[in-house]
């Protein structure tokens, strides 16, 4: 009885045997019909080549099962082509949307992302940033401009570039991307006053390690002073960004006495929780 040669798997590709020599860049270049330098350019700087050329080289890498030696490439270029993002959480859609948009911009440029959340814990944020720096990320995306002294020292000593999101220009001596939270809050008050409201309450997230909430509350206070409307301490209730907690915050407002004619929510999660509790009642 003769042994039959094993057929290649579906798709016409043969699996590389375990322990087989690693595919070299020169093999990819030969398969794609380009020079090794061109293949390297496609893999390291895909935005600098045409789509046809990029597709040809990537098809060859897929067919041969080529995997770049990231450690060697990083050592040679002194770049890891990895960026780190550290955000409070992903349950808040503003942060998950931000991360999705960030990833969409990175991928065409040949970069990938490390992601960590810290749940408004300064120490956890610092640990995540330290780990990312130790892993060799080329840069960082942070949220807000308020960070622990330890993290500020770490960023300064490492010299790693970073950008702070959800913060207006000139809010920090470092690069920022965002908008003026205090101005946005003042616009809300002006709108409500224009509708005739004079008894206004506020339900906002916790201010600890959250300069965005502090700025919004400061903007609300400033606008209400301008309109000569009081905002006593018992008209401000803080809550975690969880629907159940926000609904309880609505009941806390009720227990304080007569409801105000309007409630300001400092973000969409708070607004949704307030609406759900009001509808349930």
Image (tube, rainbow, N blue to C red):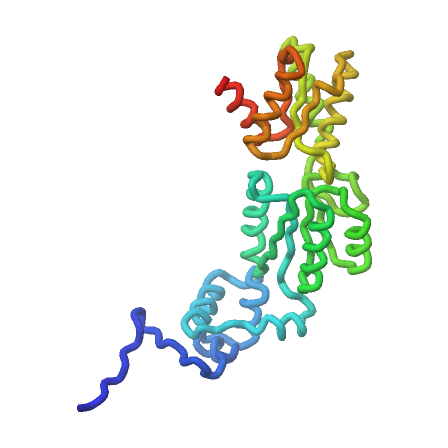
In terms of depth relative to the viewer, which is nearer, 35 or 12? 12
Q: Quadrant of residue 244?
A: top right
Coordinates of residue 226 in the picture (x, y in percent):
78, 16
Q: Please, which residue is most extreme toward the front here? A: 255
For this orientation, the residue located farthest to the top is: 196
Q: Is residue 72 left or right of residue 224?
A: left
Is 211 on the left-hand or right-hand side of 36? right
54 lies above or below 238: below
Which percent across, then down, holds residue 214? 74, 32
Q: Position of residue 14 (x, y in %)?
A: 35, 77
Quarter in which the N terminus is drawn: bottom left
Q: In this figure, what is the number of numbered marks?
A: 0
Q: Tell me which corner region of the image, top left, top right, bottom left or bottom right, holds residue 3.
A: bottom left
Could you tell me residue 88's position as x and y percent?
64, 44
Instruction: Give the residue drawn at x 79%, y 56%.
Output: 154
Towards the viewer: 116 or 248: 248
Q: Residue at x 69, y 57 (%)?
A: 139
With respect to residue 177, does 103 lie above or below? below
* Quarter of the figure with residue 219: top right
Residue situated in front as seen by the camera: 276 or 105: 276
Q: Is residue 160 above or below residue 260?
A: below
Q: Residue furthest left?
A: 1
Q: Residue at x 77, y 52 (%)?
A: 151
- Kindly give the residue lying farthest to the bottom in the view shown: 1
């Amino acid at each position: 009885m003769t042994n039959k040669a094993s057929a290649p798997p579906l798709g016409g590709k043969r699996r590389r045997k375990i322990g087989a020599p690693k595919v070299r860049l020169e093999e990819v270049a030969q398969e794609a019909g380009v020079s090794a330098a061109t293949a390297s350019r496609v893999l390291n700087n895909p935005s600098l080549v045409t789509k046809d050329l990029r597709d040809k080289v990537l098809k060859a890498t897929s067919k041969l099962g080529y995997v770049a030696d990231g450690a060697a490439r990083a050592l040679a270029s002194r770049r890891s082509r990895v960026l780190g993002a550290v955000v409070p959480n992903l349950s808040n859609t503003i942060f998950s949307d931000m991360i999705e948009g960030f990833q969409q911009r990175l991928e065409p440029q040949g970069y990938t992302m490390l992601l960590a959340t810290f749940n408004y814990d300064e120490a956890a944020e610092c640990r995540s940033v330290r780990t990312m720096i130790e892993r060799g990320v080329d840069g960082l995306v942070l949220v807000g401009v308020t960070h622990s002294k330890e993290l500020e020292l770490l960023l300064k000593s490492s010299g790693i570039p970073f950008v702070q999101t959800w913060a207006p220009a000139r809010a920090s001596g470092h690069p920022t991307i965002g908008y003026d939270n205090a101005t946005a809050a003042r616009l809300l008050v002006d709108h409500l006053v224009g509708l005739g409201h004079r008894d206004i309450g506020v339900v906002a997230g916790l201010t600890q390690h959250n300069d965005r909430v502090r700025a919004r509350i400061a903007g609300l206070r400033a606008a209400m002073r301008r309109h000569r409307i009081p905002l006593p301490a018992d008209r401000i209730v803080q809550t975690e960004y969880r629907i159940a907690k926000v609904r309880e915050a609505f009941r806390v407002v009720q227990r304080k006495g007569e409801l105000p004619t309007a409630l300001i929510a400092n973000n969409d999660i708070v607004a949704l929780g307030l609406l759900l509790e009001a509808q349930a009642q």
